[in-house]
Amino acid sequence: RSRSRSRKDSRSPSRAGGKKKPDDYGVDTMKITDDDAAFILGKGGKTKEKISRVSEAEIELFERDLILEIRGSKMQRRRAKKYAEGVMAQRTGPVSITSDYDDGDLTMLQVPQEAVGFVTGRAGNFLRTIEEEWCTLMFFCEVGSGGRNKDYEKLAIF
């Protein structure tokens, strides 16, 4: 006689159902340009994965139709859309952050001008390493419509 339990008994009930979707679960779509699609995807799909990981939303990019589909709770979708817009804005210049960007997920740091290169690293590698390790999304930005203060740069951390 076998001493192991039967297969039927070994399954935990929590495994069978998978994750329960939140009550405000939904799908949002964003129409994007070809250039933005490449930027959102990132090298090997890493940027899209990072946005998804940090926002906790499911993100799918339909490259043929240039549509970004975001699934999750209302807050997850809002954050994913905000992060995607921030990433796309980097392509054309400095990202402008306004007060409505903060859903309790934003930390702003003042980085002294002489340390910006160190924080960024060669080709942004140091910043990306920190993002990966701490499950964050970071970029340098301008706050509101204010001009640049030459003594420091603002680093947004989501």
Image: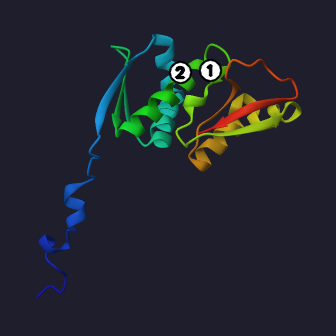
Q: Are marks 1 and 2 in contact (CB under 8 Å)?
A: yes
> Which one is earlier in the sequence, the residue at label 1 or at label 2?
2
Residue type at mark 2 is Phe
Other residues around mark 2 within 10 Å, as few (<14) / some (14–19) / many (≥20): some
* Separation of residues labelled 1 and 2 (CA atoms): 9 Å
Residue drawn at (45%, 38%) of the image:
52
The residue at which mark 2 appears reads as 39
**Quick check: 24 left or right of 119?**
left
Q: Quadrant of residue 24?
A: top left
**Numbered disc total:** 2
Q: Which mark is residue 90?
A: 1
Near-viewer residue (130 or 101): 101
SS assignment at label 1 = helix
Instruction: Inspect this view and state whether residue 11 appears.
Output: yes
**Foreground disc of the pair 1, 2:** 1
**Quick check: 31 left or right of 99?**
left
Residue drawn at (59%, 37%) of the image:
137
